[in-house]
Image (cartoon, rainbow, N blue to C red):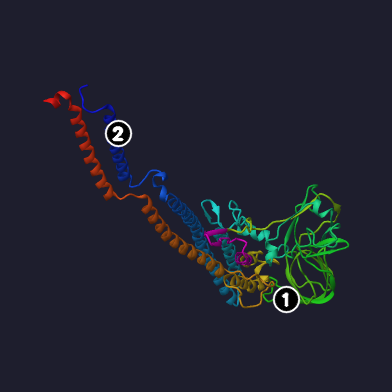
Amino acid sequence: MTRIGTYGANQVYLSRINDIQLRSHEHMVQFNTGMKSQTYAGISRDSHQLINFENEISRVDQYIKGNATAKTRLDGMEISLNAIETTMNDFLDQLDDFYAKETRSQAEITALQEQAYNSMLSLQSSLASSINGQYIFSGGRVNNEPVAQFANSFDDFQTKWDGFDHPYPTTRSGTLFELNATNAETGNVSFSGAAGTITAASLTTSPNVLSDIPVGARITVNDSAGGANDDKEFTVRSVSVGGGGTVITVSPLVTEGPVAASLKYYTTALPDQQQLNANLTFTPGTDTIQVSNATGFAVGQVFEVSGSASNDGVYEVSAITAGPPDTITVNSTKVTTQAAISTVTLSASSWYNGDNLALEHRVGQDRTIDLGVYASDPTFEKAFRAMAIIAQGQYGTAGGLENNLDRIVAARYLLNDALKSPAGTSPPYGTELTSDLASLQAAVGNNQALIATKNTVYTKFKGFLQTRASELEQSDKTELAVLLKSDETALQAAYQTTSMVRELSLLNFMR
């Protein structure tokens, strides 16, 4: 035995040195990380409160991030709505200038119609805006461009919508109507060339799949057997339901006459409008007008009927049998007689490709907002309709704008009503829905302001939570520096004492 201390005393002393080292290491970690502990167990007394703070911070972050996404969508809508406002106002100015003129040349009429078509394209483009690859005016169908292409070109549009046989629908229900009625829904369908009708005899009660077809809608006949009416497109003039089934009338004429009326027309030889008074007999199906007097008309002649009970309007001669009486066949898509068949599907398509799914966004725990602005909104539909009824119909035809100048008044009303409803005058096509661009812009602006306010509140609240959490979990570096210095001093003293003790022995003690 050469040492004074016992083994046990030595181990205890080393254990105390190790405790000082561990404490120093813990203080060093706290100093370097700035945290009181690397685990919640190290701050067990405050851990429950800290976890609640951290969960609240995470929830606030989710609201802030979600609001940022919603704000991006609303900002995109704002830009699009401003562009749409410019498009609508520019075209309305063109209409007002055109309306104020006493005389209008062919070039001016065609230019206005081209402007109408181009305005439709601009409106379509603005509504095709997308954020992060998702269309913002399509409702829930974010992958669908909201507005279908109306035509490939201006000429193509006027061919598709000729203004007479196929006029652009004058009502919202007509423009947005969709149909896909198969034989399973309609039963067998027959066609009457004599009456100009399409009949589903089994549909004797209303409502049914065909009873709600709006007047002015455009339907297409698809016959899988390739019958005489396959691929024909008809404009619906009326729909009736009774014991004989559901009857869709597509002839532009109504049975009438003889009735005293007048024909008004222009010729290349005479600059002034000519008028012929005669007894007229109107026959639908064949779409003929029998005139008691000789007209001198040729194929392509455009004339206006006035003074009848049900058939006033502008027509174009597609064939004529000279008399007197003259028998005029007007330009129209004729129904070919077919007995009831099971191979027919009747269809109609809308220009709107989206849906009306409600798009709600929660801006905070206690508030949600509606982000849905749809391309099918009456605001945009009225604007499209105003532009389309001007663009339709080639010059010199029965559907041309020069022969239907009442469309100017109607289009001006629709655009004014789309910008700020109500427009203040009598609606030309019946009561319109009251949505307008000013209301949409206000709704978007209100949502933007609400999100900005909520995010400001949440940012401040998050800062408060972070401060409180920091107070619970962050260490005091000044205090730690003092403790580390104290630990260092204690360790140095311990090591020195250990060294001195290890050098002590009985021999050295006796000396």
Which image quadrant for residue 57? bottom left
Residue at left 23%, top 28%?
5
Instruction: From the viewer's side, name the closer residue of 191 and 30.
Output: 30
In front: 448, or 62? Answer: 62
Residue type at the position of mark 2: Ser
Q: Is residue 39 above or below residue 163?
A: above
What separation in Å lies between label 2 and label 1 (alpha carbons)? Answer: 123 Å
* Placement of the N terminus among the 4 image quadrants: top left
Q: Along the horizontal axis of the image, is 86 left or right of 12?
A: right
Q: Residue 474 location in percent, x, y?
A: 35, 50
Q: Residue furthest right?
A: 243
**Residue 103, percent from left and from top:** 60, 76
Helix, strand or loop at label 1? It is strand
**Sequence order check: which comes first, mark 2 or mark 1?**
2
Residue that badge 1 annotates? 274
Which residue ends up furthest to the top in the rendered image? 1
Residue 324 seen from this side: no
Q: Amino acid at mark 1?
A: Gln
| Count of numbered marks | 2
Is residue 280 inside the magenta stretch?
no
Q: Are marks 2 and 1 in contact (CB under 8 Å)?
A: no
Q: Which residue is mark 2?
A: 15
Q: State the image quarter where residue 30 is shown.
A: top left
Question: Up-down: is 128 above or below 293?
Answer: above
Q: Quadrant of residue 509?
A: top left
**Element under label 2?**
helix
Q: Residue at x 54, y 67 (%)?
A: 443
Residue 255 on image: x %, y %:
84, 69
Q: Which residues are magenta?
A: 360-385
